[in-house]
Image: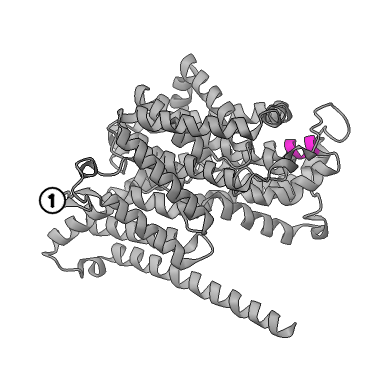
Amino acid sequence: MDIFPALLSVISDPMLLAAILLAAIVGMIVGAIPGLTASAAIAMLLPITFYMEPLFALAFLYVIGKSGRYGGSIAAILFNTPGTAASAATQLDGYPLAKSGKAGKAMKVATISSVIGDFMGDIMLVVGVGFIAALALKLGPPETFAIYFAAFVVIGSVIGKSILKGLASAFIGILVAMVGLDPISSQERYTFGSFDLSNGIGLVPLMIGVFVLGEVFAQLEERKKAKNAEIEVNDQAGDDNTLTWDEYKPCLPHALRGGVIGAFIGVLPGLGSAIAAFISYGEGKRRAKNPEKWGKGALEGVAAPEAANNAVSGPSMAPLLTLGIPGSTIGAILLGVFLIHGIQVGPTLFLTDKELVYRLFACGMLGILAYGLIGYFGATQVARIILKIPTNVLYPMIFLTSFVAAYSARGSMFDVTVMTVAGFVGWLMRKYDFNIAAFVISFVLAKGAEETFRQSMLMSDGGALVFIERPIAALFLAIGLAAMAFRIRTILREQKIAQGGLGDA
């Protein structure tokens, strides 16, 4: 298989190994900081990758994403504040375990389960991505546009509490992406006479603004993190912090099941690790021998969501690499890295840069090993470091770094303005429960969707029936509409149940 020569190539490169190790540490720390996410860290570090080799840049950010997903469990277990959305499921049993003096035991279960799930996801990616790419090579513009359409609808309608807000977020992302020159006629669109806008909205300042600055604004608004210091982290060896095989053995089936659930959800664009974690937690509790203990400090309740959370990481790269459709916000940023280095993402990538792809997979696997070892033996030390950093120092530093990062990308003050505006937009979207993932992914996908739509219209002389006459295109259009219909039905059913409950009361 191609992965074995790629692993040997990566292992023989000391500088690449150092980059992987650094990324594992950075991702873990950022993921463990309450309120920050791996997406924010990747967006802030994106300008640095301009000066790296493509593999170094991709591997560095990819491993940060993997390690950051795991790092969220540290905040969830020790601080009762999930570092990532997916870690909210880990918090349900992790924090009760920490309160009962078993923080070290819970962290070790989270680490082992994360590694198991992540490896399962990567194995599925390595085995299946070539097959998906071979199928994608046979798709024409109508089929590709139908896939884009399905992605827009699924991402906008399935994620989040409100279908309307999700679809509105996706629509706003499309509108922002249309700013600049028309790709066919070169006429200006939505530029309002501004020369700077004629080049479009830059990906780097937009990402930094939405993910980093928006999060800083949200954290400054809340300022309710004083409770984080309530837990005393104990890293001394003892009965409560030493995990035995007999203790982890009941967790293993839940970790394996969570890995399978996360791997399959990861392939579907936009669903993400939070959904995988909660589905795995619910399924684990349903199958548990003692479900009444879940939510009160069950080790199995940590294993199930953590495995699913991290298993999403690898498979979410499959739609990105084979179709050019990012399956997550991290994937959207990585797509930007590919484009920055002049690498066209899609099925032809496996014909032109197959070695790069599999070396990236190898870096991801070594990144799992790195954060697994560091987390198992040093997660509590990471927590101690984070507790010593006051928020009134941390967030101003992040705020200033965001301005430097936005300016350094192209040396443009206009990019700083874009970042600032995007920061306020990101803050407002968080405040009013709009879907940031739908906004960002739609922004990234919009240009490709427009291009394939135009090509389809030229093929059919302007006839929209081309999307119905071609079976694969019609199938994906139906999938998108069916996903939205199913989501609407689910919401209506939940509202009916809620109203029935109120009526009974």
Query: Residue 181 location, x and y as percent?
Result: 18, 47
Per the image, the residue denoted by label 1 is 187
Q: Which one is in front, 349 or 498?
A: 498
Q: Which one is in front, 63 or 362?
A: 63
**Residue 298 showing in the rendered view:** yes
What residue is shown at x 76% (from left), y 37% (from top)? 229
- Image check: 21 left or right of 190? right
Q: Which one is in front, 37 or 121?
A: 37
Task: Give the amino acid type for the residue marked by disc 1 in the picture.
Answer: Gln
Q: Secondary structure at mark 1?
A: loop
Query: Residue 3 location, x and y as percent?
Result: 45, 31
What residue is shown at x 39% (from left), y 27% (from top)? 49
What coloring was used for the rendering? Answer: one colour
Q: Residues within 10 Å of mark 1 (few under 14, many from 20)?
A: few
- Image check: 188 left or right of 70? left
Placement of 15 over or under 390, stated as above or below: above
Q: Quadrant of residue 146?
A: bottom left
Count of numbered circles on the image: 1
Most frequent secondary structure within the magenta stretch: helix
Query: Residue 87 location, x and y as percent?
Result: 64, 47
Q: Quadrant of residue 417?
A: top left
Specify the segment rendered in magenta: 103-109
Q: Is residue 106 magenta?
A: yes
